[in-house]
Amino acid sequence: MAYDANIIQRAAARLEEDRRRRADQLAQRRKAAYAREPRLAELDKQLMRTMPEVIRLALRRGVSPVEDMQRLRSDSLALQEEYGNLLEGIGMARDALENKPACALCGDSGWRGTEMCSCLKELCAQEQFQELSKLLLLGEQSFDSFQMDFYGQNIWPGQSTSPRANMELVYEVCLNYAEKFGRFPLKNLFLSGPPGLGKTFLSACIARSVSQQGRSVVYDTAVSVFAQFENRKFQRDLEGVQSARDDARRYLSCDLLILDDLGSELTTPFVQSALYELVNSRLSTRRHTVISSNLTMEAAAKRYSPAIVSRLEGEYHVLHFFGEDIRLLKKQQMI
């Protein structure tokens, strides 16, 4: 899993903000408790200084602190018992003033050794979902909300089946690809067809489902992706170069890349090189990619280099979209 560094940074900031908020709340509870029962403050001080004092005294005498620590434990238990009784006496739980982490697994650090803790993973998933939502309207787009009624049931010209039957097959492939991500036999999809037939909608459905599984997902248009690769190479401003490098790294390292509208870009030699790097790098590292395009694979073969087309034809499963423009059908229903 390779979340974008910016996503991890925002998630870690939220974790720290939550930790500070709970620390402030604890301080306020402690202040209120001390005001109602001053003895609690005295007990807190005693409990905090007892252990260091015993160890210091024991070490100064040059003997083991075992006996002093046993006495300390007995004294400490008595102080804790009094402390708990006083809290109950003012209507508070015995552990109301304990500084307990929200996550017992990592102590609210977000990490368990070198592994990201589940609490930070959850925040990363939330941040990623918010980022994807800005681009894909994920609040509205899901497999459950997909409407099959817009696809006709008559055989489509030039095809052997109807748009409805074809879309039912496409839908099932996309659904299984998303829900069984990493386990489904198909690793890469090429969604091909004219505009307005649901390619971006189903891409968003896949992004939503895979993101909710805690996987890193990046969605972007081909024009934007290639612009960032170009900035990485030609940008002179240091901050701009770093930003472009970070974006290129996201495209290359995320668990799932959704490259939308391939073919809308101006196909220059540089774009050919960038697309080869993107496709080849992700294949060599076994990372999954979904490409949507108005191009057929045959049209792509005329537009891109043989090295690119060979990888697309050999490693991507093509899903064909055909039928009436859904956007126009929806617009007509509103009239």
Image (tube, rainbow, N blue to C red):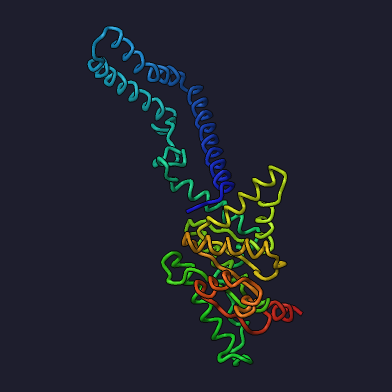
Q: Is residue 91 visible?
A: no
Residue at position x 52%, y 26% in the image: 32
Percent x, y for residue 277? 58, 61
Q: How many marks?
A: 0
- Front residue of 92 and 155: 155
Quadrant for residue 274, please give it: bottom right
Percent x, y for residue 50? 35, 16
- Front residue of 144 and 59: 59
Residue at position x 53%, y 51% in the image: 3
- Front residue of 61 and 322: 322
Percent x, y for residue 31? 52, 25
Q: Judge left or right: residue 271 versus residue 31.
A: right
Residue at position x 49%, y 67% in the image: 178
> Relative to 240, does residue 251 appear above or below in the rendering?
below
> Relative to 123, does residue 291 appear above or below in the rendering?
below
Percent x, y for residue 197? 64, 78
Quadrant holding the C terminus: bottom right
Residue at position x 40%, y 20% in the image: 48
> Relative to 175, does residue 333 appear above or below in the rendering?
below
Quick one: which residue is furthest to the right in this view?
335
Quadrant for residue 24, please give it: top right
Q: Is residue 164 visible?
A: yes
Quadrant for residue 276, please give it: bottom right
Quick one: which residue is furthest to the top in this view?
61
